[in-house]
Structures are given as structure tokens and as C-alpha cells.
Image (cartoon, rainbow, N blue to C red):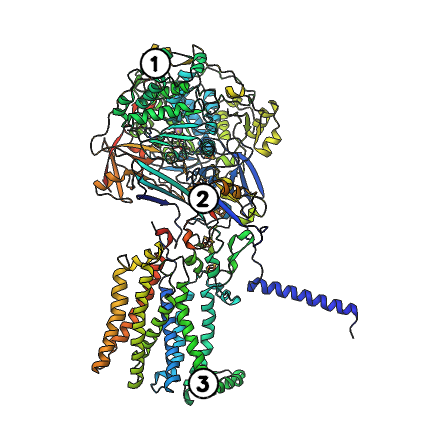
Amino acid sequence: MNTTLLESVTTRANHLIDPGLAIWGWQITVYLFLGGMVAGILSLSALLELRHGKPSSPIFRTAPFVALGILSLGMGALFLDLEYPFHVWRFYTRFQLASPMSWGSWILVAVYPAAFVFGLGSLDDSGRSFVRSWVPKNLEGLYDRVEKHAIERRREILTGVFFIGLGLGVYTGLLLGTMAARLQWNSALLGPLFLVSGLSTGAAFLLLTGLHEEERKRIVRWDVNAIGTELVLILLMLIGFGYGTESARFAASNFLGGPYTPVFWSLVVVLGLVVPLLMEAVEAKRHLPFTLVTPALVLVGGLALRAILLAAGQDSAFRLIP
Amino acid sequence: MTSRREFIKISGATVGAATVGSGFVNKFWGLDRDAVEDPNTDGDKVVPTFCELCFWKCGVLAHVRNGRVTKIVGNPDHPLSRGHLCPRGTGGMGLLYDPDRLKKPLLRRSNKRGGQDFEEVSWAKALDFTAEKLMKIKRDCGPDKVALFSHGYGGSFFKHLLFAYGSGNVTAPSYGQCRGPREVGFNLTFGSSLGSPEVLDIENSRVLTLIGSHLGENMHNTQVQDFARAIAKGAEVVVVDPRFSTAAGKARHWLPIKPGTDLALLLAWMHVIVKEELYDAAYLEKYATGLPELRKHLEDKTPEWAFTETTIPPEKIVETARFIAGARPASLVHPGRHTTWYGDDTQRSRAIAILNALLGSWGRRGGIFIPASMPVPKYPCPDYAAPPKTAQDHPDGTVYPFADEVLSHGVCDATVPGKIMTSGCPIKGWIVYGTNLIQALPQRQQVIEAAQHLDLMVAIDVLPAEITGYADVVLPEATYLERWDDAGPTPWREPFLAIRQPVVDPLYESKPGWWIAKELANRMELGAYFPWDDAGKMVEARLRKGGYDFDLLKAKGVIRGKRVPVTTEDGLELTFATPSKKIELYSKRMAEAGASPMPEYTRHPQPADGQFRLLFGRTPTHTFGRTTNNRFLSEVTNENEVWLSAKVARERGLSNGDRVVLVNQDGVRSEPVRLKATQRIRHDCVFVVHGYGHSSPGLKFAKGRGMDDSRLVTKIAVDPLAGSTGMSVNFVTVERA
Amino acid sequence: MSASKKRYAMTVDTRTCVGCKACVLACKSENDVPDGFCRDWIVEEVRGEFPDLSAEIRSERCNHCSDAPCVSVCPTGASNIAEGGVVLVTHGKCTGCKACIAGCPYDARYVHPKGYVDKCTFCLHRVQKGLQPACVGVCPTGTLTLGDRNDPASAVSQILRKRKSKVNHPESGADPNVFFLV
Ligand SMILES: Nc1nc2c(c(=O)[nH]1)N[C@H]1C(S)=C(S)[C@@H](COP(=O)(O)OP(=O)(O)OC[C@H]3O[C@@H](n4cnc5c(=O)[nH]c(N)nc54)[C@H](O)[C@@H]3O)O[C@H]1N2
Ligand SMILES: Nc1nc2c(c(=O)[nH]1)N[C@H]1C(S)=C(S)[C@@H](COP(=O)(O)OP(=O)(O)OC[C@H]3O[C@@H](n4cnc5c(=O)[nH]c(N)nc54)[C@H](O)[C@@H]3O)O[C@H]1N2
Ligand code: SF4
Ligand code: SF4
Ligand code: SF4
Ligand code: SF4
Ligand code: SF4
Ligand SMILES: [Mo]
């Protein structure tokens, strides 16, 4: 009997589940993108200061606050995605060890105070007295103590922020990467990939703001490494899928001939990684003037990476394996 | 220092406060253990009654919570449901709470029939109007000029009314468009028909052969239960169907026969069984006549001959014949139910009957049982004044010698002046109870033409079905969950009695059928025929008179009698009510009527290239068109699709899911409908589920969903013996919509 | 795990199931499942080419997985493991973040219009009272059986010993507890 030809019919037609999963849309894309970018901004600026002392470009004085603003936008998008937003506080009644979502929500609460203290230390005196002017009278004592620590324990804070940033970056990838049910996300490399991509988009954001020459060069150098790593990770991920189980091969096929192939290769790989990498390399070698094109492309690529992986993952269920 | 008492008081208060506090914290912080949430659909009241989503009469338990029916489950004590239900029975609430239900009596506003142009009127006005018109017809033309179309359990009150009125013209499409030829074929052979529910012991069959009968899609609850039980016990199934039906998926042998050629296969099977003497010789010796004639008749009906007709390879025919005979007498060839296919349906049913006789399955375990029942005494009531008039039921003026019920299409013909009523008065009034003639009868134009000649059409329905649009008066009946119906026995494997009683009060201004019939009777000086005030009281009186425990019946919905033998294995002595008192393999009666006394194969026209035979059937979640507006049931199946061979579809550039239109041989076009391109059907036919494609604007959910197969049944092949209308004789082409 | 601990499981006999969907509808009315959603569903698979065809019909639902990813990914504990290993969602704790939906290899969950995530409960509210789940109770073909897999005398245990069975996508690693008899 010929068992290859198959007609399969299901009566299930649940909204957001059928015909294909469509639970997460632009909100989560934006959230993951901004989250990753914030991770990059925080980690990179902390690292820069740790390695080379206080950076001189003006952006670094406010970067932690800018990052918080961006993160809040991302969290706003996440909030919009919740089907039961009034229960959002439920995230904070538990810590679920096995749930990246739970890790994420707690990391997010850690990011706010950390970035705030980081920011206080980055500001100059006038900036700090501006902040203090907003503090309510009865909290001024507390504020003063925080401010004192922010300045005096700078190194510890920088180290803390660096790691919290990394945590945030890894988390954005792990959120998807732990979902074995979505064949496309079922890869241990998704965490590192999202982290590196986050660092790269964070770098791109900083580059867009106009940095002093010396700092720009450092960041570009890191960015070149990040992009290179990202390309290697993507390659490894595809190889991993290709040589894996039937379900993994199905996942690889999405990007190797499947429906997501054109967008993935053109937007993420070529436009978002290869072109900026080449441009940065060429600019550095030939001492060409820096343009905003490269960071802009990196940002587009980073956004596309998340949007495409999010969609492809939802489009790669066990039920689709013939 | 605090005293011990104070200490206890304080700590008590602390504990109390802590309890309250932690309760609060737990409640809002979710630190409590997770409770198992209860959807709270159990009834505060559970009322037993029986189902009317189709005509099988399964016992149900209706859960009522705060006055609303929340769910309907099977009554474990009822022999037809045994605690389980088919999907339709599960969805009775969808009918009860259908927002499109008929809510008030309606009176036609304009003169034109068909437009659903009504005004809402009071019951008094609607009933006065109807009674006056009926009285006028009786005065002017005689009582036999009124016919009752009735399908469904509640029709009994209207039959009674019509007989009292003086007419015997009671008809239903469940005869001439459904079971008719089968009942005639079995009656001619065994002297008894199969009725509904069919008296089949499928549960104990070892081989079950299905000719079309698509059990599992055809969802008569007990029959499907028995089917599954048999399979679970290891029974084998043979399915003869041009389509890979659900049942075919369970079968050892699937024979994808060329439609319309089943009689050739049946004859060839019998040829093999007789030639190889695989039949039950002792049984035939004892009970049957005509084996020598049959043997001779079958001589040339070889598998090779049948192959050319059926496309079933001869080896397969021989193999399956032996397979079927090997399990006798627990080898049942299912008699089918919707048997009005090709116009020689009585002969095909006869062939099935004779084959069952050869297998010795009539009156045997695993075959056809002889049912038992519990009689209910009549309610004292005057005899009908004049004996019911003979039926004017001969379509085209032909007499159908074995039709034992009035034919619905015959009544239509007798309604059109000059068509068969060349002298005297044609039929003037129709009472239409629980049947949607527009979708149920073939040749719609002729049905509508007949309706246009009426002086009165009164439709008693629960929904604004198409037919109500042609009525002068529409009377909204309460649904089966809101009314009493009459009590009566259902002959079955074991004797039992069940009652239908109201679960909730009627919604809107709908009224139970008994009340409507009684009110009409009162207005026509026939009140003496309804000498009771309330059907519930009448039922109670009948049952108590029969010595039954009415209170138990009310509480349980059913009482079961002592089992009696229903097969020879149980100790039953078989008798046959044929003229010869034997199973008639050869039918003298048929010979006398000028018909072939043993089934003769006739070759039916086959579709030309590019045409497909239009076949139709059931889907488990719906009963014809009566449930396609049921939103609850339609959740899973809200439109039908046209099955077409995947290969043919590919050749025509059509793919699964495309929208297509079917055009029949007379140029009638279907509604646009989704295509199911599938391996599961032959290349020469298409299949569609009957009952979709409603056109009545009142059916707000169902209107325009899917296609209406009956619109395309413009051609029929009338069975010369039963007078039934074969409807599978229409050919269609498939166009892209 | 001690042998006395309950482990509810369901068997679905693909040989007897006719795909009638009574189980789907009974579930809807029992559990007040909103219009347009279902907790159980029918999959009909036909293999082969005319006329060599074979069919399998399955009534499917949440598998109440022994290693349920939906529970482990849930950040709030709304998805939890109740008596007998039955996987439940406590509506009041659910944020509708849908991580559990993404995490379920069987797409067995859906977002209830009220915002929480919902799915088959094995009708634990009935089972606790000694009743059968609605789908099991209605099924005219006796296709469905629910019982304690850790009790060797239970109907499911006996069936699983007697009949050949399989689970959907065993490679998911979730260790499902709905068994399809073939
Ligand atoms: N769910 C549900 N169940 C129902 C009903 C319902 O409305 N809904 N209605 C009930 C009633 S009243 C009736 S009468 C029965 C009808 O149900 P059945 O008596 O089972 O009706 P059939 O006409 O035999 O069924 C149609 C089947 O016959 C096949 N067929 C068509 N033409 C041919 C042919 O020439 N030869 C052969 N061998 N097969 C053919 C079709 O492919 C299809 O599978 O169903 C009953 N059960
Ligand atoms: N083309 C085509 N024609 C067919 C068939 C087919 O397969 N194809 N099948 C044939 C067969 S097998 C049969 S049995 C017949 C069946 O044909 P019908 O007996 O006409 O059956 P339905 O179409 O279900 O119509 C039932 C009507 O009763 C109404 N009704 C439902 N419940 C109640 C109630 O409690 N009280 C009242 N007063 N009304 C109620 C419904 O609203 C609906 O209008 O059709 C036959 N005609
Ligand atoms: S077979 Fe189904 S619809 Fe018909 S009476 Fe029984 S439960 Fe009701
Ligand atoms: S109710 Fe039973 S037979 Fe019907 S689809 Fe569900 S499991 Fe299958
Ligand atoms: S089937 Fe899905 S929802 Fe059910 S327990 Fe398994 S993972 Fe969770
Ligand atoms: S949607 Fe609800 S149940 Fe699912 S993971 Fe989020 S909080 Fe948990
Ligand atoms: S066990 Fe209960 S909740 Fe689960 S599918 Fe069956 S009826 Fe629905
Ligand atoms: Mo019928």
C-alpha cells in the first residue's frame, strides 16, 4: 500500500492557534528587539568605562537613562501583548525556576535600579542636582545615600550592570530558545545569538548618536567582532538543524528553500550582517569617513532577525512534519 | 503578666487575623493551592426525555441550571442511547436557543407564496383562520382534499386530527424519498419490514456488509454504537460504496463500485453463494420457498458478468462472497435506509433481502431480530366518523402496487389540477408538520407549482424553514424540550417505554403540537376527539391504564420490560406474514403485479465524459437541513464541500479548497461551494452532504452556507413497485465559481 | 514516584472512532467552551492512493504530559500539575502571556476570550466526583477511556497491556499521556 500520499483534516480551528500559530506578533518582536538593544547599550557602555575609563562622548552621560526609556517602550509592547493585562502583577508573585519568562520579568526589575544607579554615576553634578530636584522631600535622605554609593562604588556597579545587561540579552534569546515545541527555536545557540545581536544593535544605537572618534573606533571594533560571531552562530545553528532529527531538519528547511528563505538571507544575513561587516571593515581599513548607513543596517537586520525568527518559529510545529 | 485566658484570647485573635490575612494574601498573591475549577454546568434539575434532533428517539437527560438547559447527555437507562449520544443529540440546546426560531403565529400578507411575507398574529386569529379554511375545503370538496405531510414524533396529534377530519392522506418524505423501497422489498420477502429504528443485531454480527449505508456518517446512535461494539469484538466489515466512507476506513474489503450497479454485484454474490452451496440449507429448507427458481435465475449472473457492470474484479467478488457467507448466520447485509437511488430500488432491496435469507440471518443473532415492545392502551376517544379516504397518491396517474404509504410526490401531483386529478377536485389543503418539503422532495419546481394551487397551506415548524415561506399560516411549535408528546412503544431488541416530557417552559409564544391540534379540533367541531385538557395528563392516563409506573417513568424517562426471545438463538419460533407463510425468494405477488419475481438487473444511464453523478449523504453532526442553522452543532461543520476525485480535479486544474459550482443536466446551478479534491471517491461521481445551502432568509446562520443538493435533483427515476423516487440519477459538471 | 500515586491517562481507539465529533460538542457544553474554540478535536488521516486507501481517525486533546513544557515555561504558576498528573490552568493566575501556548508541542491550548489560557482538564472536576469526562461519557463508540495508569487494574492499564498503542510526536520529549490504540 502506498502510504506516502496523505490527506489530513482536522476540526480544530482555534483563534491564534489554527491554521498556524499566531500568538506573538509585532509587540514581541519590538520587545525582543528593544530588550536586546538595551542589553547592548548597558553592557557596552559599562564595559567601555571599565576598560577605558569614563567615556567622553556626551551620550554616555545619559545612556543608562535613555536605555531605561527604550526598555520601557519595550515593556509597553510586552504589556500590549498580554491577553490578560490586569494580571500582569502575577509575574511578581512567583519565581519559576524553569521559566525564562519568569527570569525575564525578574531581570527586568533588576535592570531598572541598576541602570538608574549606573546613570546617576555617569551624570555630572548639574545633572545630578537636576535629578535630585525631582525627588520628593521625604525621600531625599534615601536618594542622597544612593547617590553616594553610585559615585563611590562605581566599579562594582559597572560590573553589575555589565552582567545584568548580558543576562537581559541572553534572556531575550532563551525565551524562544527553550521552546522545544517550536522546531525553529529549538536550538541552544538562540540565546548567544540574540545576545550577540543585542550587543551589536546596542552598539549601532550608540554609533547613531555621534560618538567621539576614539570611542567610535572601539565600538566599531567590537561591533565587527559581534557581527562576525553572529554570522558564525547562524551558520552553526543551520548546521545543527540540518544534521539533527527530522524535526530539526524541518526547521532548517524553513531557511534553506522554505518560505522564510528569501527574507532571512536578504534582510538578516546580507543586509543586516554581511554588508555592515564589509562596510565597517572597509571604512576601518581605508580610513573612509564613517556614515550612519552601517548602524542603520545593523538595526534593520536586528529587527528583522527577531521578526523572522518569531514568525518562523510559530510556523514550525510538530504537526507540520509530514 | 497576662493570664492564660488572655493569652489564649490574644493568640486566638492573632491566629484569626493571620488566617484572614493569609487568606487575603493567598487569594490575591496566588500562593494558595490551585483549585480545580468547575464550569458549573451540572443542572440543579435533570429532566429525562427523548431526543428529536433526528427520528431515532434516544433517551436523554437534560440539565437545567437557573432555568436554562446547559447540557444534554445520554440516559444510561434508555436502550437506544445507553448513556451515549450522537453529536446532534448533544446539541439540542442549539435548537432550543436558536435566535431564529419561529416565535409567533404568522399569517401571509401578500397573495404570492414563497416570499416569507408575513404578519405576526395572535394564536386565536391564526387558528380561526386555519380552521375556517379547512372547514371550507371540507364543505366544498370533501375532507379527503386535505393532506398531512408529517415527519417527526410530534406528528401523531395531527394524524389523529386529520383522520378525525375525515382524510387518510398522511404522507412523509421519509417513505417515498427514503425507506419506501426497502420496506417493500423486505415485506415482499419476509412479510415484515424493518421500521425505524431498524431491527438489526449489528452488535453481534461477525461480518457486516454495507451497501452504501455510511454508518459513522449516518449517525443513528444505537446503530453506530453496535457497529463499534462489533468492530471491537473483531467483526469484519465489507463496504460497497463509490466513496471511501468512514465505514470503508474500518473495512476489511472496500469495493468502490460504479454507482447504480449494486444489483449486479448482489446477484453475482448470490451466484457464488448458491453455486458453491455456501447458503444456510437447513434454514432455507425450513423457512423459504423458491430456491430452485432462484438458482436458475442466478445461473448467468456470474462474477465476470458483474465485473463489466460494477468494475469490481471477479476474483474480488468471489472472495467477498465467500467471506460474507463464511460468517453466516451472523453475517448481516445491511438493508440500508435511504434506499431511493435509481428507480429499481425495490428490486435491489429484494436482492439484499434474499441474500440475507441465503445467509439465514433473518431472526438470527447477529442478523435481523424480531423486535419486542410494550403496548400502551388507547385513550378513550370516539371512532373516526368516516373511514379515512383512500389516498390520492399516484404520481403521473400510475398505480404503485406495493406502495403501502401515501407518496409525498403523489400528493403534490394530486394537488395540481388536471395532472392526475383529471376529474373532481384536486387536493386543496396541506398541513405540513416537521418536514421541509422544499429540501426534502425532488423536482422542486413541481413542489412549488403544487403549493401555488393550494387554498391553504399551514406549516407547523420550529424554524423558518424554506417550506414555511410557502404557507398561508405558520404555527410555531415548541421544541421537543418544551412539550409533552404522545406515548407509544418503540419495537426493539428489548421491550421498553419512554416518554417525552417538557424540560423547560416553551419560549416565546410557541405552543406544543398537541395544543395546536386540539385547538384546531375545537374550532372544527372535532373537540370530542381530544377529550383531555393536557397531553401530559392524557399520557399519564394511558400509561396508568396499561399498568405502568408513571411516576417512575417521569423520574427515569424510561422503563424496561422483561427481555423476550428476539432471535431463534434465544428460542424464538420464526413466522412469516407472507402469503406462503414462508420467506419468498421467488415472489408470486410480484409476478402477479407484472414485475420480475426475482431481482433483475437493469443498466442505468451513466454520466458522459466530463459529467459526474451527483451523490449525497450525511455528516455526523447534522440531520438534513434541520440542524444546519443550529449554531452549536455548526461549530464543527458549518458548510458542506463537494468531493471530487483528486486525479480528476488535477486534470481540470482545480485544487482542494477552490470554490466551484455544480451545473446539472438541466442547467440548474448550485450555490458556490468548496471543493474537496480527494483520493476518497471514484472518478465518475461527486458527493455532497445533504441539507446545506439554505435559502430562507429567516435562517440567518445557515442561509447561503454551502450548497443545496436537492436543488439539483430535477430528475427522478420512479420505482415501479414502491412508487418511490430514485434521486441519484442527476449528472453534473463542475465549474470554477 | 510511588506506585500508589495516581497518573491519569486516556486511551483513544482509532479502530472504533468514527470521527463523529460528539466528544467535541459534549466537551463544549460541559465546560462552557466559548464559540469558535475547542478543547478536543478530530484528526482524520487518509493514506494511499485510490483505491488502496487506509484511514485513521483520532480524537485529540491535551496530552497531560508527564514532562509538561507548558507548565515549566509558565512564569506565574498558573499552569500547574494537579491531582493525578492532570495539567490545569488556574485562570485567576494567568496573564495571557502565551508562553505556554508556544511551549506546547501539541497546540492543545488556546486563549479564552476572557484573556486567560484554557485547555482540556481531563474533566478533573467530574473525575474527582467519580464521573467520566464529558467526552468519554458521550462517545457512542466507546472509543475513549480515562483512568489511572499507575493502577494496574484500571481499564486504561488493561487496555494498554492488551492493545498496541502510540502517542503523538513522542520526539517532543513531553511524555504524553493520551494513547492512540491502533
Ligand atoms: N448524521 C446523520 N445521520 C443520519 C441522518 C442525518 O440526517 N444525519 N439521516 C438519517 C436518515 S433519515 C437516513 S434515511 C439515513 C441515510 O443514511 P444511509 O442509509 O446510510 O444512506 P445512503 O444513501 O445509503 O448513504 C449514502 C452513501 O451511499 C453511497 N452511495 C451513493 N450511491 C451509491 C451507489 O450507487 N451504490 C453504493 N453502494 N453506494 C452508494 C454514498 O457514497 C454514501 O456513502 O441516515 C440517517 N442517519
Ligand atoms: N436531495 C435529497 N433529498 C432528500 C434526502 C437527501 O439525502 N438528498 N434525504 C431524504 C430522506 S432520507 C429523508 S428521511 C427526508 C427527510 O426530509 P424531512 O423530513 O423534510 O427532514 P428535514 O429536512 O430535517 O425537515 C425537518 C423540518 O422539521 C422541522 N422541525 C424540526 N423539529 C421540529 C419539531 O419538533 N416540530 C416541528 N413541527 N417541526 C420541527 C425543521 O425545522 C425542518 O423544517 O428527506 C429526503 N430528501
Ligand atoms: S441518533 Fe442522535 S439525533 Fe437521533 S435521536 Fe439519537 S441522539 Fe438524537
Ligand atoms: S465521540 Fe467517539 S466516535 Fe465520535 S469522534 Fe469522538 S471519540 Fe470518535
Ligand atoms: S499537551 Fe501541551 S498543554 Fe497539554 S500538558 Fe502537554 S504540553 Fe501541556
Ligand atoms: S499564558 Fe497564562 S498559563 Fe500560559 S504561560 Fe502565561 S501565565 Fe502561564
Ligand atoms: S476530558 Fe473533558 S475537557 Fe478534556 S476534552 Fe474531554 S470533555 Fe473536554
Ligand atoms: Mo431518511
Quarter of the image with the N terminus of chain B in it: bottom right
Nearer to us: label 3 or label 1? 1
Disc 2 crowd, CA 10 A, few/some/many (<14, 14-19, 20+) = some
SS of the residue under disc 3? helix
Quarter of image, res B633 = top left
- Where does residue B262 sit, x and y in percent of width and height? 32, 25
The residue carrying mark 3 is: A154
Disc 3 crowd, CA 10 A, few/some/many (<14, 14-19, 20+) = some
The residue carrying mark 1 is: B295
Residue A239 visible at all: yes
Residue type indicated by callout 2: Ser
- Where does residue B610 sit, x and y in percent of width and height? 21, 34
Quarter of image, res B540 = top right
Residue type indicated by callout 1: Arg
Q: Is residue B490 left or right of residue B596?
A: right
Kindly identify which numbered label has been placed on residue C165: 2
Q: Is residue B44 above or below residue C116?
A: above
Q: In the image, is the residue at mark 2 within 8 Å of ligand 4 by its beta carbon?
A: no
Quarter of the image with the C terminus of chain B in it: top left
Residue B454 visible at all: no
Q: In the image, is the residue at mark 1 within 8 Å of ligand 1 by its beta carbon?
A: no
